[in-house]
Every structure is written in C-alpha cells, then in structure tokens.
Amino acid sequence: MYQINDNYQKLPGSYLFSDIAKKVKAFSDANPDAKIIRLGIGDVTQPLVPAIIDALHGAVDEMAKAETFHGYAPDLGYEFLRNAIAENDYKARGCDIAADEIFVSDGAKSDSGNIQEIFSLDNRIAVCDPVYPVYVDSNVMAGRCGTYDAASQMWSNVIYMPCTRENNFVPEFPKETPDMIYLCLPNNPTGTTITKAQLQEWVDYANKVGAVIIYDGAYEAYISEDDVAHSIYECEGAKTCAIELKSFSKNAGFTGVRLGYTVVPKELKCGNVSLHDMWARRHGTKFNGAPYIVQRAGEAVYSAAGKAQLKDQVGYYMKNAKTIKEGLKDAGYEVYGGVNAPYIWLKTPEKMTSWDFFDYLLEKANVVGTPGCGFGPSGEGYFRLTAFGSYENTVAALERIKAL
Amino acid sequence: MYQINDNYQKLPGSYLFSDIAKKVKAFSDANPDAKIIRLGIGDVTQPLVPAIIDALHGAVDEMAKAETFHGYAPDLGYEFLRNAIAENDYKARGCDIAADEIFVSDGAKSDSGNIQEIFSLDNRIAVCDPVYPVYVDSNVMAGRCGTYDAASQMWSNVIYMPCTRENNFVPEFPKETPDMIYLCLPNNPTGTTITKAQLQEWVDYANKVGAVIIYDGAYEAYISEDDVAHSIYECEGAKTCAIELKSFSKNAGFTGVRLGYTVVPKELKCGNVSLHDMWARRHGTKFNGAPYIVQRAGEAVYSAAGKAQLKDQVGYYMKNAKTIKEGLKDAGYEVYGGVNAPYIWLKTPEKMTSWDFFDYLLEKANVVGTPGCGFGPSGEGYFRLTAFGSYENTVAALERIKAL
C-alpha cells in the first residue's frame, strides 16, 4: 500500500486569508449597505501599462503564423529576456551577473517554494519573523522543520529571527548557526528594510559560517532610499553565498501574468558542486519555461516606454502608501514601512491582538486589513495595510480611520 | 556549512537531446549544403488556431483596463476553465469528475514532476520502459530510486515494465508490488496504447494491491480507435486509485503557451487522508496559478470554433503520422504507433543500435529522429519519429528514407 508524505499532516491549516474572507462575508451579509474597502491582500489593481499590452498583442500575433510561432521555450528562458534582465537589473547597478546565471520562471512564489529542493533535508533554515509564509511551509513539506508547537506558533527546527520595533525590524544574527537563511527585503509584511551596509554584514556572516542566503527581492522596485541595495549582488562576496529571487508581480503588475526569475551565480558552490548546475537540472526536469508571450511582456518592462510607464505606476502605489502612513500617524498610530515597500505595518493600539484590531477596523471603519500574527509569532500585535488599492479607496479608508 | 541534495549527484547526465544537437551541428558544419529535416523533438510547429488567438487578444485587452484587469488567479484555476474541462473532457464521456477536482497548472511537465511530492519517500515506483524521462528523474531527485547501474541503465529501486514488440507494447503486472505506477497512454515514445479493457485491469490491480496510478494522458487527442479510453476515469474504480495529468500542448499547440491540469478525485484517499487536499495544499503553497490570458486561451479550446479548428490541426499531424508509418512500411521497416499518437516507433534494421541508426539516418537521408535508448533500456534497438513537422517536410523525409 502506498503511503503519503506525512510532513503535510504537520502543517496547521492555512486559515489566514480564508478566515479573513469568512469574517468579511459574515459582516457584509449582516450589513449589506456597508461599503467595504479592502486593503488586505497584496494584489495589484492597476491595469498593465500600454507598453506591456502592446508587447502581448504583438507576441500573440506571432503565435498565429507558422513562420513566427514559438513552441517550447529554452529551458532557462529566452535570451532576449535574460539579456534585458542582466543589463538593467544587474550590469546597470554594477553587479556582475551574466545572462546565463538568470533562470526565468513563472513567478517568485514557485521559485521560493521550489528552491529548497536542491538542498539537503538535514539543513536548518532561518527566517525573519514575521515573513511571507511560503519559506517555512515549503520546508515543512520537505521535512526540514521538525514539529509544530501551537502555543508558540513555532517549528522546533526553524531558527526565528524576530523583526519588531524593539530591534527596528533589523534581523540579528541568530545564536544557533543556520544553513539556509531566507531574507525578504524590503520585507513582506512589515514594509521595512535594511541598509546596504547591514546587508553586507549578512553576506559576510553567511560566507563565514557557510550558510546560503535565499534573498527574495520581490519589492525592490519600491525602494526609495539611496542607502538600500536593489540587489544582494551589490554586496561584496554575495556571489559565493546568495541566490536571488525576483518577481515581475509588484513592479509591473504581473500577479495574473506570472513571471519571475532566480539568479544562481556560477561561483556559488557547495564543495565542488555547482548550485547553478543543480538548479538548471531542476528547471530542465520539472519546468517547461514561461510562456513566450509572457516573456515578451517581461522584455517590455525594460523598454524605454515600459520603464517610464511603470515608474508612474509604482509612484501611484507609493502615493497610496504615503496616504496610509501619514493618515495613520495623524490618527495617532505607531506606523512602520511604506517608504521602501508598498506595505504599512502598524502597532495595534492599547495592546489589542491582531485579530481584535481586524474586527475593530472592519466593524467601525468597514476597512479590511491583514492581522500581523498571520505572518509569524512576532507579528502578533501588528497589522498590515497595503498600498495596492485605488487612490480614491485609499483616501476614503483613511478618512474613515481618522474619524474613529 | 549547508549541504546539497545528494540525490542530484546520482543522476547521469541528461545528454539525449544535447547529444543529438551536437551530432546534428557537427554534421551540418561538415555538410553545409545538406537540407536537414528534423522529426526528432516532440514540439508542435503549426500556429495557434484563430479561436485561440482571438481569446488571447481579448484577454490581453481585459488586462489593459482597471475594470477588467485580473490579478492573482484562484489557486486551483478559474471556474470558467475548470467548468469547461469538467464538461467536455469528463461529463461528455460519462466520467463523473467535478470542476473542483480539477487543478489547472502551467503544464503537464510541472505536474508530472511535482506530483511525487505528496507521497512518502518510502514508496516504490513502477514505470513503463521506455517512457518519458521526467517520471524517473523527478523521483531520483526526491530520493526514491536507489542507485543507478550504468551497464543496465536501471535504478536499483525502480520497477521497470518493459513495453516491446515481444509483449505488443502492453505492460505486464510486475512481479514486485509497486506503490506508485506511472502510465503514459497513449505512450511517449512508442506511440502505442492499450485498450480500455486492458486499462480496466490496471485499475483493478491498483485497487487490489493498494497502489496509486499516475496517469499521463497528454496524447489523448490523438486517439482514433474506439476501444481506447480517453480518460482513466472511464474505468470503474479509477477514482479510488488514479490521478490523471493532462496537457494542452499537443491537442492545442500550447508547448510555448503552457497550460495543463491534474485531476485528483475527492474519493482518492490514503487511509483517512485526502490526496485532493494534499495537492490543493501543494498548489496553494508553491504555485500561483496559470496566467489569466492563458486560461482564457484554454477555455477557447472548448468553444465550438476552437474544437473544429483543433480537430483539423490534430488531423494535419495525424496525416503526417500516416505518411511516416506507411512510408516506413513501404521501405521495409517494422513500425509501431502512429494510430492513436503522433509518434512512430520503428525497430532498427539489422540489429543496429539506436545511435547507429541515428547516424545512418542523419548521414544518408539528412533526417533527424530520436534514439529509442534515450527513453529507457528497453528502447534500445528502436527509434522515434514524430508527426509534428510540416506535411511538406514529412513527405520529403520519407521520400529520402524510401530512396535509401
């Protein structure tokens, strides 16, 4: 009789967003006239910009003719896209990353879930707390996390690095030595980040202790401060210790288009074994490339028109972020993030729990956010609002909150 | 110091298609005037049909406006596509599969590589030999296959089910009991299949011994004979033992568009544990949906216009298959497949090895095919040609072969 992967049974229910949906539905049913504004989920709302739409239509037309039809894509992605990425996201920033160190994928969620596969099950992971849940969950499924303690909401074999107002949201080197360190910077959900100098310390630490850094730069486009690195490869020595994951979801609105990439430098080796070769093998065996039309859309992100249009789009969301942050401050809240990221992280007032504050905001202001405890134990007592709504809704939501 | 997944080191180099490419390049360099015809790779060549092109353009236009923009897709796929699949691929054939048992993905290669994750590492797999290499390779990476013996080209912990002319390419129940049985029917690379009655025996066997069948139906659209099942769920009892993988690559030319789906029936349980729930959790944790525009293209596959146009496209490739099969027979070859699949499988003449025949065909006829030994040890002495070229090239290739 076949058996299942028992690690799945260890996972607690993933109830955060379904609990939110249930609570919102119950409230909405009981209050049909309430105009609910959703600033909870990290999904974009603005349409694709014209340069990307044009590229998509153009690529669709190519697929309509035998002479320009495209079948299976090259394993690692089309040259035209990998070159545009290498040129714009790396060489232009002084990072020596070559096109053949870039692996195009269907999105950073897949990559951040799959990357652990090339590592030993004996490795121990370290994660910022709070953080995007995929890092821990994908390692639980693989069997690296030990057992779950419902009281502390912690896994026995995971090293948690709390990021709270007490340490200004800067993770500290853990007491126990990790093998794999997940860093999401700028951070989801806190919207905070660290300076390039602080990131350099992490690179030095990883090289010293023999750890690999999985660096998730999904929110890089929102960085506005000069002393923040746009890529971990701006730090010296990163090519021997870091893998970088990037997404087109938040800089170009591709949440429903699906495109991302992973950089595995050729210098990154475990003994004699090239991690680049391993990821290439994983990619070649279990993935068949991102769609041609989507890769052409990705290329348009780096065109002159695309860059200008997307700068405006990111600016639109960051105006929302400022509206939320300033509005919350005016209303007397303690607020973080929102400067280098589209997320605003607030401390709940009067020691309310994250869920209590969720209920309070829903009932009194008809505004939906995300309870911080859903992102890790250190998120308890915090709350996330996102800048991805429309400007009109964002302004209206803050007026309501200020009026409370 | 972190460690890697050592199972990757066990994999022999994946040299089949790169060896082919190298040999073809060397020949081409030495013979620049030779007009090489490629009937080797299983990639389609005909453009997307108008109904699909129209759907793609329409969906792109929706992404250009805030009111019709689509962000993150539902985890399991859009209702409109899952309903179309349930209706057309299952209910219309008398299979009781509901829309919420269907998981939309970016293609059957991803699904066939990822599906093993929800099973125990202690399970033992059985595969047809020869077969699509992803089944074994993905299990090697996970650590289920034991050690590789280069002489026999076999893994110590894999159960091989030879499919050769001696057993008319019908796999026999193995002597040792497997936990997971991979069946690709119609088969890649042999182009052969089994009857519905024979498939029913496999379903009964799996239910009896407590095995799960991973049923890859990627070539279903090419079935022309009445006694062949289009889905394993046409067999009684399949919902308690089988997962079905389907692709849009070969029926609709989506090799570069990327769309597939997996059916995990709710009745499929290991003890009390629902495999449907497990796959939903895997999907929700490590995947973020297929692109909206691609899912709309998938929907168009099931429209009246789409069905009519794709029937013609499949007919075009099957005319090629017939051309190859009849041509090879006329030339005196022993030929299999090509009736319910776009692959033709020939026995090499005069006990030539697969690679000897590859060289012979390349040098004498300037035609590229695929050595059968690349698909498993029982593929030695066989050779695959595919029907996915243009009709003109296919006819020309066969004229050359007949003239040898």
Image (tube, coloured by chain):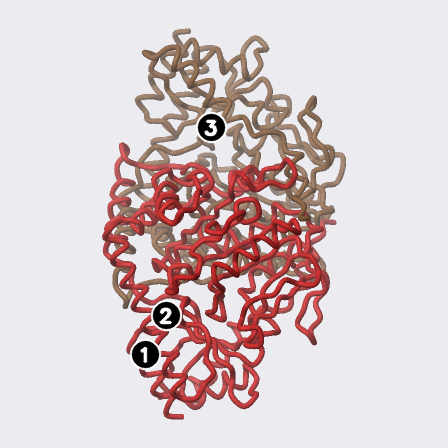
Chain colours: A red, B brown
Asked which quadrant contains residue B374, the reply is top right
Disc 2/disc 3 C-alpha distance (Å): 49 Å
> In the image, which is nearer the foreground, mark 3 or mark 1?
1
- Count how many numbered circles sit on residues in the image: 3
The single residue placed furthest to the right in the displayed view is B176
Mark 3 falls within which chain? B
Instruction: Tell me the amino acid under the disc marked 3.
Output: Tyr
- Tell me which residue sits at (25%, 58%) in the image: A309
Placement of B93 over or under A359, stated as above or below? above
Q: Amino acid at mark 2?
A: Phe
B8 displayed left or right of A357 = right
Q: Which mark is residue A393?
A: 1
| Chain containing mark 1 | A
Q: Amino acid at mark 1?
A: Asn
Give the labeled residue for mark 3: B343
Q: Is residue B99 visible?
A: no
* Kind of element beneath mark 1: helix
Determine which quarter of the picture holds residue B183: top right
Circle on res. A388: 2
